[in-house]
Image (cartoon, rainbow, N blue to C red):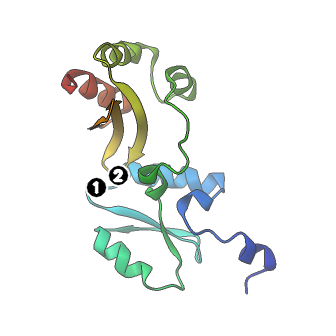
Amino acid sequence: MQTYKDLMVEAHKWSDIKDKKVRKEAGQMLKALDKGEILGYSVEHEEFSIFTSEKDFKDAKKDKKMHWVQVEDWVREGELIDEAFNFKSAVKLGMLEKSDEKYIDIIEKKKWEIYEFNLTSKGYEIILMSGSKKKTFIGDTPSDALMVASKKVK
């Protein structure tokens, strides 16, 4: 039986999940996903499940009792990311190394800016913007994604 608090704070999307342990576990599981797989979280049972395709996830979502939310959904739609990318903060958090600044400089010299830097099931995704142009690059590590972006962007 759900309590009043449970009913009032029910999670409808991944950004509603505030438990740090759950978020940390999700981050570890996202790293292990293969291409095309989707990580789902059942709010009802408070557990994760890996779906082999988007269709499988949508089919599972039809069962309203399980209350499935897609873990990386917030990354794709940018619901939690409202601030610009900050290299110093990324280094402080341990996401990037100080030596990665050379790639940022190359990208900025080519008149591109980092719009988003996300962890997805495919790897680390960097989205660059220049005016209305938008380019996406993916790497196995954050440094790798920056290196690929700095080489391929013109």
Q: What amino acid type should be assigned to the residue bearing mark 2? A: Ser
Marker disc for residue 121: 2
Identify the residue at image location x=33%, y=43%.
123
- The crowd level at tag 1 (other Cα within 10 Å; few <14, some 14-19, many 20+) is few
Most extreme residue toward the front, as rendered?
132
- Determine the image quadrant of residue 89: top right
Identify the residue at image location x=57%, y=53%.
23
Query: Residue 100 location in percent, x, y?
Result: 39, 18
Above or below 45: residue 129: above
In depth, the one of 41 and 72 nearer the eye is 72
Disc 2 element: loop
Q: What amino acid type should be assigned to the residue bearing mark 1? A: Asp
Disc 1 element: loop
Q: Quickly name the residue at label 1.
A: 34
In depth, the one of 123 and 76 nearer the eye is 76
Q: Earlier in the sequence, mark 2 or mark 1?
A: 1
- The crowd level at tag 2 (other Cα within 10 Å; few <14, some 14-19, many 20+) is many
Can residue 87 be seen here? The reply is yes
Identify the residue at image location x=22%, y=25%.
153
User: In the rendered image, which quarter contains the N terminus?
Assistant: bottom right
- CB atoms of marks 2 and 1 within 8 Å: yes
Above or below 119: residue 110: above
Query: Residue 31 location in percent, x, y?
Result: 39, 48
User: In the rendered image, which quarter contains the C terminus?
Assistant: top left
Query: Residue 94 location in percent, x, y?
Result: 52, 28
**Label 2 vs label 1: CA separation?**
7 Å
On screen, residue 59 versus residue 78, left or right, reads left
Identify the residue at image location x=66%, y=56%.
19
On screen, residue 10 versus residue 55, left or right, reads right
- Determine the image quadrant of residue 21: bottom right
